[in-house]
Image (spheres, grey):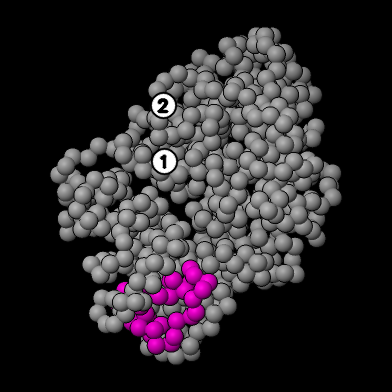
Amino acid sequence: MKRWLTACLLLALAEGAAAQGRGPVQLFKPDSDPPASSQPTQEGARDPSLPPASAPPPAVTASPGGIDVSTLSAMDPAGVGMSDAEGGLGADLWQGSSHEAVVRFLDQLPVETATGTARALTRRLLLTAATPPAAKPGLPSIYGLRISRLVAGGMLIEAAELLRRARPAAGDHVAGTAEIDLLLLLEDDAGACQRIQALVRETDGADIVKALAYCQAQSGNKAAAQTSLGILREQKVADDGTLRLLAILVGEASGRIDSLPKPSPLQLAILRQLRQPIPNDFVANAGPGVLAAVLRLPVLQRAPDQRLRAAERAEALGVLSAEGLAQVYAAIEFKPEQLEAALSEVSPAAGANVGALFHRAGELKANPRDRLRALRLAIAHGRHLGQLPTMARVNRSLTRDIAPGGEHVIAAPDIVRSLLASGDLEGARNWFEFLTRVGGAGEGETALTAIGPLMVLADAKLQSPSGAKLRLWVAGQPEPDRAPRFGLLVNLLHGLGLSVDGEAGADLPPGPAVVQSPMPSPWLWQIVQGGSHQPRGETIAAIVALAADKQAAKLHPAAWAAMIETLRGLKLDKEAHTMAVELGLAAGL
């Protein structure tokens, strides 16, 4: 059966190649920049706030942590990537690991995370130039898995640069498939189809046959595409929506697709050719790589609510810059009365547009008091929906415009939280130092007490709060949240190597002697606790996997303390403090 399927594929491929009648198109030439062949395959106006198809999403042009992929050093293919000076995690990253272990960790590595620290560590882990363990036949290549995870995570420029520096080995189907996904996401159908034609001679999986059918249809050879589609049907391949899309593309079916719950680069490419509306579940479930490409589609401009949801989610996942989201907000029209009502005591129900409404009100109001109120409402909205980092980043310029002063003391805790959530530690320090100078009683002391512990988590220069100050802080927390917030704070401080006065929690009401909270899986927990005794790459990968998990917020505080302490042991102190702040903000500190 497999031989028969391979023969059919080669027949379909021959038909497609004859119809196309063109030579191969090379995506990257050695030691040169990518050619300008990655141009849109469809016409239509594009939104100037979003990148063209040949460019990466805004957020990947400058990676967190000072990483600049444009300066990657040329290395042998096995260890291509960033040096330590460029932000790498060390050439010995995988020392002591087996090929099987690295494959397992890279497979487990999440690509979808709204946690900045985990996202930055993931990028560095995948880009670091490190000597890999000896390859084991029958397992995927580590290089191929790195490319695959970069593309899925929306780090398209980084993936393209690695591919430019080192071509995959012959037979590396993981890297080959990832490169096809990358080219489809960049709308370079010519380059993608060249790689598909090469790969289809080496493998006969259903996914490559679907991709072949797309290339045949896109080139105008619908007969060959129908042959490939018939092969898939005869093999009773389950349809995740791609077969239906292909049938519409070749004219065997009509109508539109209303649901695509498992988005893929190929599905997006077909939708782009069909110029069909994007199903809502496609946007809701798309991974970072696909989501970044969705934002560039002209069809999304005709669906403003969907475009807004996609942009906010893309910003949270790190594949759209805060400036890009602000431009999406700016394209939404609000009536003057809506902007006025946004600042009233009871803010209006604005549905999905509420974040945009507060942002626009803050940007358009000239009165400093109105601008401050809009900012505080945006922060409150973000905290309520668990979107504080996004609201903080998109309103960063507005926050920075507010200088520390006596008239703003009451708003100081919100301003400091917003600054920390947007990564502006220096701005937060300015406010904290101002409050420290003001001191005394009243609003200044209340504000200082409210944000003191959070600043200690953020700033390595500060010492742990005294027991008396922590007792005041505990008293200021909502009663149901006092014990869990205190427990998290104490564990985070311990993780950062700071002691806590034993009397700090004396005013808490007595509770159960044993508190149940989820703990990490035994496998990952063993790696985290092993710290310096475990291979460096495995330890970082385990921490990232835990921090990015959807259930991470429910983990026992002691687990977070161990992860932060282990980061410090790996000399990743900045990341330890940043992770502690992210957890504190998420918990409402």
Q: Earlier in the sequence, mark 1 or mark 2?
A: 2
Q: Give the residue type at disc 2.
A: Arg
Residue at (83% x, 47% y) in the render: 135
Q: Is residue 244 left or right of residue 483?
A: right
Give me the C-alpha separation between circle 1 and circle 2: 14 Å
The residue range painted magenta reads 446-475
Depth check: 186 or 417 in front? 417
Let me know if residue 453 is in the magenta part: yes
- Place of residue 242 in the rendered image (x, y in percent of width and height, measured from the top left): 55, 29
- Label the magenta part by its dominant secondary structure: helix
- Place of residue 555 in the rendered image (x, y in percent of width and height, measured from the top left): 53, 68
Q: Give the residue type at disc 1.
A: Gly
Residue under label 1: 324
The correct choice, above or below, for 469 with respect to 417 in the image is below
Element marked by disc 1? helix
Element marked by disc 2? loop
The correct choice, above or below, for 157 with respect to 477 in the image is above
Let me know if residue 443 is in the magenta part: no
Residue at (72% x, 43% y) in the render: 73
- Place of residue 109 in the rendered image (x, y in percent of width and height, measured from the top left): 63, 52
Residue at (36% x, 43% y) in the render: 326
**Residue 46 tag number:** 2
Question: Crowding near pointer 2: few (<14 within 10 Å), some, many (20+)?
Answer: some
Residue at (75% x, 51% y) in the render: 130
- Residue 259 visible in image: no
